[in-house]
């Protein structure tokens, strides 16, 4: 079957969006009773990963940022005071720990193409792929903050320039992953020959921005290419994802937004020569589930009561790479704000769109902050059956191929989902057998991307 004839997948992909931090997108989450604040302990991550693994989640991945948020008011002071992503541990060592604590769960980590080096990234994820038996996932980001550039002592790059560099970066990384042939290692004690030198070769790549001689010092890993996750929202980001991504993490606040994004990305896949349904599209979603709808709504009300609009603006300023504190809080938003930001313009456009949808055409910056808190992602609230109904509607109507679930609190949210929602999805045939083994590519039916 050619790639253009690839069928749409039968089962949802279910991922968990986790953070090596006390907070992620749920900025008030550390105040909730079911949040475990011990994020400097290995037991926190081991316990969480094992919950996800046993309940049938397909993968977990760690987001990352390389600077403490300082765009808002040009200072880290309020970030530190409120805990708005002030902590970010390095996810790579944590993933190495989890490789030995889990059996089937895909293990993803974020690494920047702007501030990393291709050889380092290729080596880290090939090693993780070996240590996990083929479960490594690299979340490819180009980074978006001036603060990150300053931490690395380099000039800030504009979005288009970052993606041009990322294409080169991926060309090198994937070539390094293939610098060892699949059967290059012989380990022949009789002849004393360790490996076949004809099957290991330099890559001799020299680009405009990056170069690498190769070969890699890590033999070919179980997947050949560890799976690539990407989350570009802009037209350039979608083009990049169409070329490289095995999984696409998208933002879609409503089911109509999901359908439009889904259809648009299929066109990008076809333009890249990969065909429709080349990679699963999995929007972020927040699940608040209770044994009854009343309990779920009570949880939601308590969570929303913790929202602080200024804290949300700290977060959006970081995403936008723009100090929103310079704007009046109570005047109508204007479309030129989208072009003024140099971070995630797609998300800013979504925030403004949702603010106007919820609060009218004269929506203000404070309204945008409320939207980010309540509807930055689609939110599914209710008893297990109601939550599953909402997820199924998205999946069946080609608004997505699954979800990356974000917590209101951790590990409490994931424990609730594992106990109630996952069994309901399995009963409906919407997710696969949790006992299935193999590499993450094999289990999720991802395209073989290797050149060999």
Image (cartoon, rainbow, N blue to C red):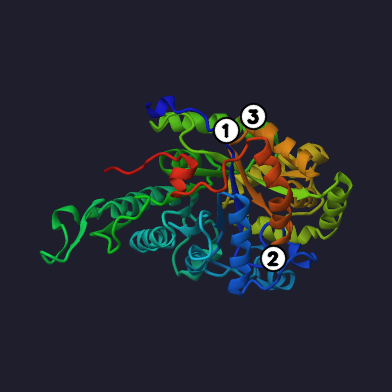
Instruction: From this view, report whether residue 78 is shown above or below residue 426.
Output: below
Badge number at residue 4: none
Residue 443 in sight here: yes
Quadrant containing the N terminus in the rendered view: top left
Q: CA distance from mark 3 to mark 2?
A: 36 Å
Which residue, given by chain and number where applicable, does mark 1 sit on? 262
SS for tag 2?
Answer: loop
Q: Nearer the viewer, mark 2 or mark 1?
A: 1
Instruction: From this view, report whether residue 444 is shown above or below residue 81.
Output: above
SS for tag 1?
Answer: helix
Relative depth, front residue between 70 and 178: 178
The furthest residue to the left: 191
Q: Position of residue 33 (x, y in %)?
A: 80, 66
Quadrant containing the C terminus in the rendered view: top left
| 3 or 2: tag closer to the N-terminus | 2
Relative depth, front residue between 311 and 184: 184
| 1 or 3: tag closer to the N-terminus | 1
Q: Is residue 120 left or right of residue 392?
A: left
Badge number at residue 84: 2
Q: Is residue 48 left or right of residue 108?
A: right
SS for tag 3?
Answer: helix
Q: Position of residue 150 (x, y in %)?
A: 50, 68
Q: Position of residue 233 (x, y in %)?
A: 56, 43
Q: Nearer the viewer, mark 1 or mark 3?
A: 3
Residue 69 in sight here: no
Task: Please report the residue visible at 71 percent of the width from the left and 39 percent of the height from the top.
Answer: 353
């Amino acid at each position: 079957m050619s790639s253009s004839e690839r069928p749409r997948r039968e089962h949802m992909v279910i991922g968990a969006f986790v953070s090596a931090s006390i907070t992620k997108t749920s900025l008030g989450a550390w105040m909730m009773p079911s949040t475990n604040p011990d994020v400097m302990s290995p037991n926190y991550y081991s316990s969480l990963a094992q919950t996800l693994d046993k309940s049938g989640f397909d993968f977990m991945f760690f987001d990352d940022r390389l600077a403490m948020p300082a765009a808002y008011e040009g200072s880290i002071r309020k970030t530190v005071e409120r805990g708005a992503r002030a902590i970010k541990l390095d996810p790579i060592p944590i993933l190495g720990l989890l490789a030995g604590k889990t059996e089937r769960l895909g293990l993803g980590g974020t690494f920047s193409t702007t501030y990393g080096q291709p050889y380092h990234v290729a080596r880290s994820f090939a090693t993780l792929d070996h240590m996990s038996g083929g479960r490594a996932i690299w979340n490819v980001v180009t980074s978006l903050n001036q603060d990150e550039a300053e931490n690395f002592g380099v000039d800030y790059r504009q979005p288009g320039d970052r993606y041009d560099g990322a294409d080169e970066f991926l060309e090198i990384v994937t070539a390094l992953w293939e610098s060892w042939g699949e059967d290059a290692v012989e380990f022949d004690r009789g002849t004393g020959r360790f490996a076949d030198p004809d099957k290991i070769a330099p890559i001799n790549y020299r680009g405009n921005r990056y170069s690498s001689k190769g070969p890699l010092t890590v033999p070919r890993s179980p997947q050949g290419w560890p799976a690539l996750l990407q989350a570009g929202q802009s037209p350039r980001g979608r083009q990049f994802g169409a070329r490289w991504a095995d999984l696409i993490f998208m933002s879609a606040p409503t089911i109509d937004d999901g359908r439009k994004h889904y259809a648009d990305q299929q066109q990008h896949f076809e333009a890249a020569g990969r065909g429709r349904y080349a990679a699963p599209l999995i929007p972020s979603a927040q699940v608040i589930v209770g044994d009854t709808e009343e309990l779920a709504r009570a949880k939601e009300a308590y969570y929303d009561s913790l929202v602080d609009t200024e804290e949300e603006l700290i977060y959006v300023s970081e995403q936008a790479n723009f100090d929103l504190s310079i704007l009046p809080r109570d005047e109508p938003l204007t479309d030129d704000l989208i072009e003024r930001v140099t971070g995630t313009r797609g998300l800013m456009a979504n925030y403004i769109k949702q603010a106007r949808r919820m609060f009218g055409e004269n929506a203000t910056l404070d309204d945008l902050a409320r939207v980010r808190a309540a509807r930055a992602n689609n939110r599914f609230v209710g008893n297990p059956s109601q939550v599953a109904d909402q997820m199924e509607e998205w999946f069946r109507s080609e608004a997505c191929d699954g979800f990356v679930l974000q917590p209101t609190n951790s590990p409490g949210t994931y424990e609730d989902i594992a106990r109630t929602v996952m069994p309901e999805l399995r009963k409906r045939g919407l997710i696969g057998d949790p006992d299935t083994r193999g590499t993450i590519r094999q289990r999720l039916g991802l395209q073989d991307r290797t050149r060999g």
